[in-house]
Image (cartoon, helix red, strand yellow):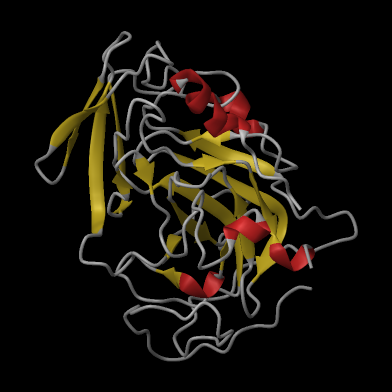
Amino acid sequence: MLRFVQKSKLQLLPQIKLSASLLIALSSAVLFTGCNKDNGIRPAIGSIGVAPIIPVTPTSSKFISKVFDYQPAPAQFINEINVGSPEAAQAIVGGINKLVSLGSFGGFIVFGFDHSIVNKPGADLGIHGNPIPGWSEPGTVMVSQDNNGNGLPDDEWYELAGSEYNAPTTIKNYRITYYNPKGTLDVPWKDNQGKNGVVPINRWHTHNYYPLFAANQDSISFTGTRVRSTFASGTSAALSWGYADNLSTGDDYATNGFNSFDIDWAVNKNGKQVVLNTIDFVKVYTAQNEPGNASFGEISTEVRGAVDLSMSK
């Protein structure tokens, strides 16, 4: 019975149903205090500058065209070829029918499109995950512009601030380090809050959960915004809006089959909202540090693909 429930998390995939004008740079930036994602109003704040724009062409695709980086945190599906490997990460290019796990808190994937996504009123980006009723695994989304024009995601990153960004339970600059147990054992971790724990092995996935393709085979660290756990009584509730792999009502995942994101939600590392006229790269990472339960295992964001919503209308 438990084995069927465990497998169903991966099997119950929902059915899926030029260039920009330059923004006027204003003089000041304001602290982000929550953006109404539905009003379609540009915030009156300073533009960070204009990045080179790769326009949409007749051959452009609305789907991911390239995965630049995949660094998962330890978790039950990591090292399994179909869902927790570099091959699984590359498989989400060009569609929404494959699946990759990002592992526990901080594990991430970085991808891009064959064109710049232009910031227009309303939602700009859709990310397909794998939430089911009673089990969401929220992932934080970050975006970047190719300001230096080299085609690589090596410029500044901006978080798309979701519903939990300013919550008192949210920890900014949360850092966690996982240690390779060098075997089929619980994976120990320590964080910068003075806490420690483990990513526990479960009976359904009996292998080393530490990514065996990681550059460092002793330890691996991640830093990001940690949101509160929503795990209770064997379920993991959705957050309101602004997170991937999240069965939220705020952006109607049940109808759309994806979580929607507005580039206007972008904030810099100091929490100040910024204006981005386009984006070129997207990063998604697991936002909760939660071991979960023996049926579903730990909370680990899953990604099936992403779309430029302006090309989906």
Q: Please say if 287 is above or below 121.
A: above
Which residue does the image show at 67% across and 42% down from the upper left?
66
The answer to whether residue 259 shows anywhere in this view is no
Where residue 193 sits in the image (x, y, percent)?
A: 12, 46
Where residue 202 sits in the image (x, y, percent)?
A: 35, 18
- Quadrant, the C terminus: bottom right
Q: Nearer the viewer, residue 165 or 216?
A: 165
Q: Residue furthest front?
A: 1
Q: Residue furthest right?
A: 58
Q: Nearer the viewer, residue 32 or 201?
A: 201
Where residue 276 sits in the image (x, y, percent)?
A: 54, 73
Tally of marks = 0
The answer to whether residue 272 shows anywhere in this view is yes
Which residue does the image show at 35% across and 75% down from the upper left?
272
Where residue 16 sits in the image (x, y, percent)?
A: 73, 49
Instruction: Please state if 279 lies on the left or on the right of 74 as rendered.
Output: right
Q: Residue furthest left?
A: 194
Instruction: Please state if 299 lies on the left or on the right of 228 as rendered.
Output: right
Q: Nearer the viewer, residue 136 or 198?
A: 136
Instruction: Please state if 121 lies on the left or on the right of 181 as rendered.
Output: right
Quarter of the image for residue 107 reads top left
Q: Please say if 207 is above or below 215.
A: above
Q: Nearer the viewer, residue 6 or 107?
A: 6
Quarter of the image for residue 122 reads bottom right
Q: Please say if 270 is above or below 47.
A: above
Q: Residue furthest top?
A: 183
Q: Please say if 49 is above or below 81.
A: below
Instruction: Please state if 87 lies on the left or on the right of 27 as rendered.
Output: right
Which residue does the image show at 47% across and 57% down from the upper left?
243
